[in-house]
Amino acid sequence: MYNLGRAGLTFWSPVINVVRDPRWGRTQETPGEDPFVVGRYAANFVRGLQDVRGTEHIPDLNARPLKVSACCKHYAAYDVDNWKGVDRLHFDARVTEQDMVETFLKPFEMCVKEGDVSSIMCSYNRVNGIPTCADPKLLNQTVRGDWGLRGYLVSDCDSIEVMVDNHQFINDTNEDAVAQTLKAGLDLDCGNYYPKFTMSSIRQGKVSVEDVDKALRNLYMLMMRLGYFDGSPEFKNLGKKDICSSRNIDLAVEAARQGIVLLKNDNGTLPFDRNTIKNLAVVGPHASVTDIMIGNYAGTPCRYITPTDGFSTYTNVQTQQGCEDVLCNNDKLIGAAVDAAKTADATVIMVGLSLKVEAESLDRLHLFLPGFQTQLINQVADAAKGPVVLIIMSAGGIDITFAKNNPKIKAILWAGYPGQEGGRAIADVVFGTYNPGGRLPITWYEGSYVEKLPMTSMQLRPLDNLGYPGRTYKFYNGTTVYPFGYGLSYSQFTYKIQSPNPSTLDVKLTRFQHCHDIDYKPGTQKPTCPSVKIEDGLACDTHYTINTQIQITNTGTRDGDQAVIVYSKAPEGILGAPIKQVIGFRRVGIRAGQTVTVPFQFNACKALSIVDYQAHTVLPAGQHSIVVGDGVASYTYDVNFT
């Protein structure tokens, strides 16, 4: 696209904010609620955009050539867009230092350290009173100093203006705001404040020419690394033939297939047999959708394959909308959908959300399907002659307990927003050309969850004094519709785990290392040396490796994928420790009847550490647990300090 004059070489992507609250409108832009998973996604996304093959590890990384410049955003603690009159342009995120280190900053740290991203974008909101784009601790001290960013820092668009007009931060003038952001480390203003007010800020003595030069050096260095001035010979032959190629379209199909999650499949209803299902009713507001499938910030698709298009390649299809649109404000069209289901061999109900319900600047108020969609589903399921499959397109989780518990609804699939080839991918899964292996990247809470706490409460851990439950799978132990990491398959799998030898880590502390106290629940036995701070110089990179082998057998009759998720659990009794936390994951394809061994190598300092209430990352003493999935296999691992 750049060679054809249709694009630049800097892309402000990916969004790597953690999904803290299920109402957030921008959930569709992120990889989920777990900071480690989000960080791994960030690093790989960035490497895919930026890396020029063969130059990933050249000696001078500041001069490393870039294919395209990526940007991890929105830094930091940004996840309230517009909820009950509270919007991102005015919101002050009150965040504990513990949550900041453990959740909100972790993906960005991984993006910089593991992805070597060339840009970070600061967000509109304040964090503990200070606009993120004017916070020298967040920008210069953390991103550049602690993490070592090689690149530039950019504002979300018009953030400096927002700082002056909306936050009214310490009654700044325009020149004050420019001086503060430049000194904090902001190199580029997506807006007009730097062009309009930098010179007058210099004349007033509020910022120096050296501060401006520093920002310009960061920007011009990036342009040089991109080949902006002298070209990138290895990419000069890319052109129109490489856009919408069959290879790219096949990749879009595979991405959509891998992302589909099977939530319910009573009595092995799916996959359908095309020799049995001669007439299929496809009903619901998403039956023939096009642009809804690509969500936001998607660019121009090569084409659309709607669900109706996809199913039509397998059988005869009869389509009825059931609703005028996704909001489903009346029941006028439900009757026609019911009639279609009465005569069909099977019925697929396509429902969910869209940008009319969840989007940038639009958070949700509840977790239920919009309008009359629930009524549509129930009436169609009651009338259907054949088996009924419910397919959800959405980003955020939805309380579909009624459908989960309805015996007439035999199977449920979640497709996210599956992209231009979504209809083809969905049909391939329903008719068994592809065996689903996706896992939910977020918790699907019951609808009552959002009545228990405001979206503006930033704490991840439960607040018992206010009656607020915890957030995400790490700190919420209540009932769910479907938990984080949930997903079924058309195959069955068994797991065995081989515990490492030795299964104990004995650490002899030096005179520079000290025992660090951490809080335990009352009545729990605390070790003599409860923990050691990672920053105290533990030999993490060389001595503390945990090698784990997980054996998986496909006992079913179909080839299938397993997304293997490995968690660690801290020793019992530590106050405020996560219920569990992801420390590794891998997707593996396993043929029917085959057994594969999946190796994992963990660094104990990363895999077993927790963040205490003072925001220290510590390695606790005691008996840790390494757990696969929802507990299909596990072992214990002891850490002792002397």
Image: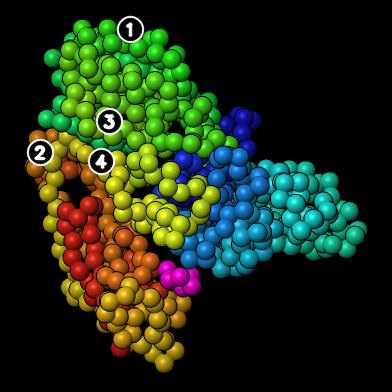
Examine the structure image and report whether residue 612 is included in the region drawn in magenta.
yes
Residue at numbered disc 4: 487
Q: Which mark is residue 556?
A: 2
Res 625 seen here: yes
| Residue at image coords 34%, 28% | 392
Q: Nearer the viewer, mark 1 or mark 3?
A: 3
Using the numbered discs, state the Cα–Cα distance from disc 3 to disc 4 in whole angstroms.
19 Å
Image quadrant of residue 583? Answer: bottom left
Q: Does 269 sit left or right of 522 as displayed? A: left
The answer to whether residue 158 is above or below residue 624 is above
Residue type at tag 1? Ala
**Mark 4 or mark 2, which is nearer the start of the sequence?**
4
Q: Which mark is residue 402?
A: 3
**Mark 3 or mark 2, which is nearer the start of the sequence?**
3
Q: Are marks 3 and 4 in contact (CB under 8 Å)?
A: no
In this view, the residue in front, 119 or 173, is 173
| Residue at image coords 76%, 46% | 165
Res 288 seen here: no
Q: Are marks 1 and 3 in contact (CB under 8 Å)?
A: no
Quadrant where the N terminus is found in the figure: top right
**Mark 2 or mark 1, which is nearer the start of the sequence?**
1
Q: Magenta residues, as a range?
A: 611-616
Using the numbered discs, state the Cα–Cα distance from disc 1 to disc 2 in whole angstroms.
39 Å
